[in-house]
Image (cartoon, rainbow, N blue to C red):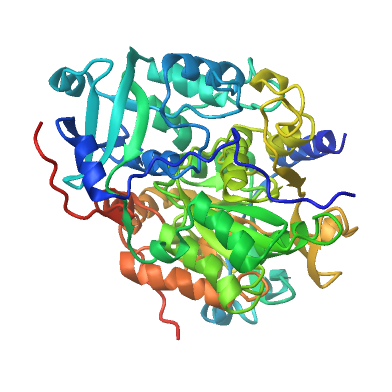
Amino acid sequence: MPKFKMPPPHGGRLVERVVEKRDVAEKMAAGAIEYELKPTTDPKGVPIRHVYREIISVCYGFFSPVEGSMTSGDLERVLKERRLENEWVFPYPILFDISDEDLKALNVSEGDRLLLKLKGQPFAIMDVEEIYKIDPKDVATRTFGTPENNPEVVRQPFDEKHPGWMIYRCMHPNVIAGKWTIINPPKFREPYDRFWFPPRKCREVIKNEKKWRTVIAHQTRNVPHTGHEMLMKCAAYTGDIEPCHGILVNAIIGAKRKGDYPNEAILEGHEAVNKYGYIKPSRHMVTFTLWDMRYGNPIESLLHGIIRQNMGCTHHMFGRDHAAVGEYYDKFATQILWSEGIPSFGFEAPPNEVDYGLKIIPQNMAEFWYCPICGEIAYSENCGHTDAKQKFSGSFLRGMVAEGVMPPKVVMRPEVYRAIVKWWKVFNYPFVNNKYLEYINKELEIDLEPMEIPKA
Amino acid sequence: MIWSRWRFLRREVVEMVHYIGIILDDKRYEQIKGTPLEEKIQYIFGGTLRMLVVEVPEDKSQQILKAFDRARIDSRGFIEDLPVAFKRALFEEIAKAKSLDVIDKILERLPEIQELAKKEEEYIPPPEIE
């Protein structure tokens, strides 16, 4: 077996669109038309997405080879075949949407330059390539699929209860397409700052500091229970001539569905796993990507593969119900995609076996449960005591946490629980609620330094 | 294919009777100790957790799911993401009746529990831990 090495970025080149030099940035933004970025809100006015997270993820290369808001050609190709016009696989529409009123007020046209402001400060510029209309409901439905068009994995029609569908459904009907460039690099606030490893930095850390040749990525939107920990430990036994050298936890940070844990608790909960030695820090590293999670199970898994390949991972573990909510998709839709492909989504073969596909290697994992007969956390494909299994259920754990009961350490490490309680005390609530969504929409994860842009 | 087998198993789970689990901390355990309920305690995760399991017929679980928009049936067939107020009221009824057959009583109290649950959306007191 050949030894694996770090794969190239998706698309062959890491996108980096961040200008560090202040004088260069000021010149680039001079005379641009100003626009203050706004969140996407649901019909009740609750913020459910902020495009600034997509701008950061694009400009730092997490979403390479995407360089900005998609043109109508890219959008159509992504919705039809999950590919960009340049052929590279990409799962989701990345769109800079804008209301009729704002578009009219801006009075921009193709070739113009926009200065995108955030928290009142210059943040990024955008070169307008195209302005076009969308039907947000149509984009939402085609993004996630339907039982009729995608019978392999879609089990029920998407609706208002699905947070990802709602993000696209609530977008404005106008899209401005064009490349983004950050001109005022963000300063991440605590605790985000110590987990910020954009792709170039992450690749350097993996190669030069950690000296990992093989790395398996762990997707998370949750504080870890011991089932997650066992998933990480066991999936990492894959590799080539030896188990993977490193486990890269990459948390998706942004607006989440109500009832999930706050972003801060997720990061510190995972950090506790290595800080307290459940997996040695020399083998385990916690990072994050800014993205308002779409909960798109197989579609989301493609984005996860791209992000983590760009960060330098060789492998990606995929568990049951990957990045899912509700019963919209088959619980093993992600495994079906990565083991057989899903033709109706444009994959006659797994995404790492198609042209212009991914190079990251999937590790599809089944389930972990507690077996009282084995007396340990068992893997479903090993344990023969199926009738006795005691499944890990995130919602069961959330119920226990909400009732103020400290989970036993066989289910959740006490240090992880302490991370939950630490942030519970800050937000007066253990989970995401409307108040938390409003808080993160106001404060965001970053601050920007004041910047004066000379008038044209 | 192995995945097809899992899909089949999943359909079976969906058609099962649903359940609600009530965790028994020491305080709750003291309230039912010595009653017939004690025999019904399930010890899970290596005996580290005590739980009473209430069976909920399909039609009644639908009423509960309708009353609380975040409530859902998890992969074990348990109704989860229920408000703390619901679980608290359910335990009260169990302790009062010394029986697990209390779902009808709880359904009668749904409007009152819904009111309490609304307050819970803003604030749940954090536990005091070291």
Q: Residue furthest bottom?
A: B130
Image side of residue A80 versus residue A360, left or right: left
Q: x%, y% of residue A316? A: 69, 48
Q: Is residue B30 above or below residue B116?
A: below
Question: Which residue: 47% across, 19% down?
Answer: A75
Question: Which residue: 87% across, 59% down?
Answer: A383
Image side of residue A118 versus residue A197, left or right: left
Relative to the observer, which residue lies in front, B40 or B79? B79
Q: x%, y% of residue A417? A: 52, 72
Q: Is residue A121 above or below residue A203?
A: above
Q: Residue A105 falls in which quadrant of the image? A: top left
Relative to the observer, which residue lies in front, B75 or A295? A295
Quarter of the image containing the C terminus of chain A?
top left
Question: Which residue: 69% across, 56% down?
Answer: A215
Q: Is residue A245 visible?
A: yes
Q: x%, y% of residue A112? A: 23, 21
Q: x%, y% of residue A436? A: 32, 54
Relative to the observer, which residue lies in front, A112 or A47? A112
Q: Is residue B81 visible?
A: no
